């Protein structure tokens, strides 16, 4: 049981809602709102791939974590590096295999997503703005992956979801690096605020977040058919969650406010990422999908003792 708890800590289980919420728009747009087994398959593959990425993150950064996060499973010697590397690699391989079993395009994109995850964890995480772009690109591509799993094609609306999700996550990634700002500076870890400076990094985060919501609203002006009214509800709620929890950070850029902004951004992503599903499903159905996901995430964030 202790080993199970250790692995749950390693995969950052309170964050489980992020890959699900990022995959939903593409999958449901491609399925025209039908909750098929292929939609479920896309969500499961995305979830386990995300968990494998979290494990690889701790594997590649175990030496740095020995100073910055010594309580984590690898630096605290509750798991050996091999006990992290092997399951993560197996999960990645299974995700690739499942992708190809569904269709070739999905399998190829899983390989791309694994490569992006590896590049981020092994090279770009401590490379400032490169890290703040690389990981969000992978999160945004989960929309495309969901569509490919379901239909083998990417409907035009999915590209709006990809752009909005990527931009939102760029803003989120920059903001959340503030929670470790002093430790990163002390140990020579180059995050975006360290590389660009605090105020330029906050400005870039705000610009990316605003651009995300602009992209999310573009279909209203560009597409011939007006999306369902429910389309905008989750985007507005996500914007409120992001703004409210980031205000303290912009007023006083401290690590405490950075961690508060991190939690708000995760909640905001669950509200914002799936806003495009309102194009295909009713508001009631979208509520039945998003609210349980949001409730469980908030509960895990509150009850979990680990730092996410």
Image (cartoon, grey):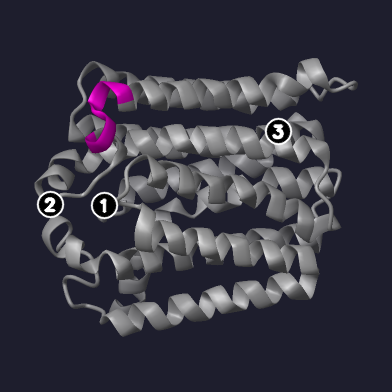
In the rendered image, residue 87, in percent from the top left (x then y), is placed at 44, 80
Q: What residue is at 19 percent from the left and 39 percent from the top?
A: 181
Locate residue 197 relative to residue 144 in the image: left or right.
Answer: left
Dots 1 and 3: beta carbons under 8 Å?
Answer: no
**196 magenta-colored:** yes
In the rendered image, residue 233, in percent from the top left (x then y), is placed at 65, 23
Q: Is residue 283 above or below residue 42?
A: above
Locate residue 39 relative to residue 153 in the image: left or right.
Answer: left
Locate residue 305 relative to residue 230 in the image: left or right.
Answer: left
Residue at label 1?
Answer: 307
Q: Quadrant of residue 83?
A: bottom left
Badge 2 marks a residue whose secondary structure is loop
In the rendered image, residue 34, in percent from the top left (x then y), is placed at 84, 49
In the rendered image, residue 135, in percent from the top left (x then y), is placed at 47, 49
Mark before the other along the chain sequence, 1 or 2: 2
Residue 187: mark in rendering: 2
Q: Report the mark closest to the observer, 1 or 3.
A: 3
Q: What residue is at 51 percent from the left and 33 percent from the top?
A: 168
Give the distance between the C-alpha atoms of the residues marked 1 and 2, in whole angstroms: 19 Å
Stretch in magenta: 194-200
Badge 3 marks a residue whose secondary structure is helix
């Amino acid at each position: 049981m202790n080993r199970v708890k250790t692995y749950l800590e390693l995969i950052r289980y309170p964050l489980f809602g992020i890959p699900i919420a990022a995959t939903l728009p593409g999958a449901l747009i491609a399925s025209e709102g039908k909750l098929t087994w292929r939609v479920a398959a896309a969500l499961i593959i995305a979830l386990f791939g995300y968990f494998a990425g979290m494990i690889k993150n701790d594997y590649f950064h175990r030496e740095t974590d020995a100073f910055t996060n010594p309580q984590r499973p690898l630096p605290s010697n509750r798991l050996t590096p091999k006990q992290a590397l092997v399951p993560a690699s197996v999960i990645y391989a299974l995700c690739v295999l499942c992708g190809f079993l569904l269709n070739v395009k999905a399998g190829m994109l899983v390989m791309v997503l694994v490569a992006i995850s590896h590049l981020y964890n092994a090279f770009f995480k401590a490379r400032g703005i490169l890290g703040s772009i690389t990981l969000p690109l992978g999160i945004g591509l989960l929309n495309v992956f969901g569509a490919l799993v379901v239909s083998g094609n990417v409907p035009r609306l999915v590209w709006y979801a990809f752009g909005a999700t990527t931009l939102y996550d760029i803003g989120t990634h920059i903001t959340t690096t503030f929670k470790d700002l002093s430790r990163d500076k002390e140990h020579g870890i180059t995050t975006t605020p360290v590389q660009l400076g605090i105020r330029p990094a906050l400005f870039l985060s705000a610009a990316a977040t605003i651009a995300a919501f602009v992209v999310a609203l573009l279909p209203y002006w560009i597409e011939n058919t007006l999306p369902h009214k429910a389309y905008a509800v989750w985007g507005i709620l996500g914007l409120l969650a992001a703004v409210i929890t980031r205000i303290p950070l912009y007023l006083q850029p401290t690590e405490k406010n950075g961690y508060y902004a991190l939690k708000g951004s995760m909640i905001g992503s669950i509200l914002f990422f799936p806003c495009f599903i309102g194009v295909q499903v009713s508001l009631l159905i979208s509520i039945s999908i998003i609210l349980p996901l949001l409730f469980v995430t908030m509960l895990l964030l509150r009850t979990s003792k680990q730092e996410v």
